[in-house]
Image (spheres, helix red, strand yellow):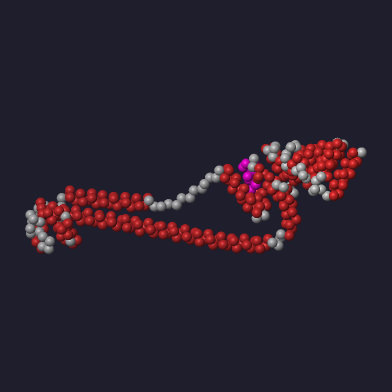
Amino acid sequence: MSVINQMLKDLDDRQSDLQHSQSAQIPQKKQRTSWKLIIFFVIIVIVLNIAGVFIWQLYSENQSLKSAYEPLNANKQRDIEYKKSQTLTNRLEQKTPISKSEISTVKKEEIVLSDLENTSLSKNVESHPEVTVGNEPLINQKIDAAIEKDPQPINQKAIQTTNNNNVLVNKVAEDAVNDKATSKPTLSISRKQLTPVELTQQKIDQAEQALAENKLSRAEQLFEDVILMIPEHKIARKKLAALWFGRQAYQSAINLLSQGIQLYPEDREFRLMKARIYFNQGQTTAGVNTLKALPKVENVEYQALLASHAQQISQFDIAARAYQLLTTLEPNAGRWWLGLAVAHDSNSEFEQATRAYQQATTKNDLSENAKQFARQRVQELGE
């Protein structure tokens, strides 16, 4: 017996068990409630973890920006100091007037002496032996003399050059900060579009899970969705018909199976399920007409159902053909030979009936009473 037919029988038995399942549903509700609480707490923990990761990323990025910006400020300050010291050195060499404000700034920051050790001012020590490290009073005396001689400020060209350098350093710092900001990592979530085949398989799996959990309404809805997307889906159509048969929606199940027969005229499962529904409702003729449309189906269950019900409505020629095919499929089964003999006997085909009765008596699966009946009919037909 096929899986579909076994499912039909299981659904029939399940209807009587539904009345005794009310008391078993209460602990299930409690279990669902506990599961909801667990899922709620899990979601809260996940949200808190995501928030913590996000805050940590912001903090790390802020620290990175600070560490990137501090070297730039130091470089900027060093360039400014270098320009000032270079300008002062040039003034000493060329005896260019220097303003008191510039000299006081240099004195306050003590840049002149340090730059004299590391810059080009050290090259001029030989030509100016009076300018040496640690001889600050002599340097100041030279600077004061230059100021008294011509207290004019530094020319505008030197100031403009310094300003341009400052603007360039600021621009580099801003570009570095902007590059760091634009390289901020982002989290993007995209939704994958499922193909019709993938979506169908997903719904089939969900329907199977619903059946395993005895959620029949949910399974019906999922199978209906599959058929709406892919009407040619055999499994979904057969299982949906079985579910409708199980809740006694006979006409809906018949219509669903009839559509399946139109799509697949050679599929015996659709015809077998439809015939069983007809037989269950007492519509034997309709069931036989459904099955006899495929008379040469080599399936024991199919031919046995057709033969027995055709014999009930006195369609002995159809029953004889079905039993004949059964004896070919299972030649050692005495019940098929006895059925074939009775069909021929009832259709007044006595010679074929006699041979079938004789074959039936040689089989071991028949009871003694059945064998005695076959021998008696052979004697009667022989007379």
Is residue 49 shown above or below 166?
below
User: Does residue 120 appear left or right of residue 251 in this picture?
Assistant: left
Residue at (15%, 53%) from the top-left corner? 120
347 or 195, which lies in front?
347
165 or 25, which lies in front?
25
The question of residue 224 being in magenta is answered with yes
Q: In which quarter of the image is the C terminus?
A: top right
> Residue 347: horizontal and vertical position, in percent?
86, 37
Say whether residue 44 is visible. yes
Residue at (72%, 47%) from the top-left corner? 1
> Residue 137: horizontal and vertical position, in percent?
10, 63
293 or 81, which lies in front?
293
Residue at (83%, 45%) from the top-left corner? 361
Residue at (50%, 61%) from the top-left corner? 45
| Predominant SS of the magenta segment | helix
> Residue 147: horizontal and vertical position, in percent?
11, 57
Is residue 305 shown above or below 71?
above
Which residue extends farthest front? Answer: 362
Say whether residue 288 is visible. no
- In the picture, residue 27 is in which quadrant? bottom right
Per the rendered image, the range of residues in magenta is: 222-231
The question of residue 362 being in magenta is answered with no
323 or 134, which lies in front?
323
> Residue 30: horizontal and vertical position, in percent?
64, 63
- In the picture, residue 298 is in which quadrant? top right
Which residue extends farthest right? Answer: 383
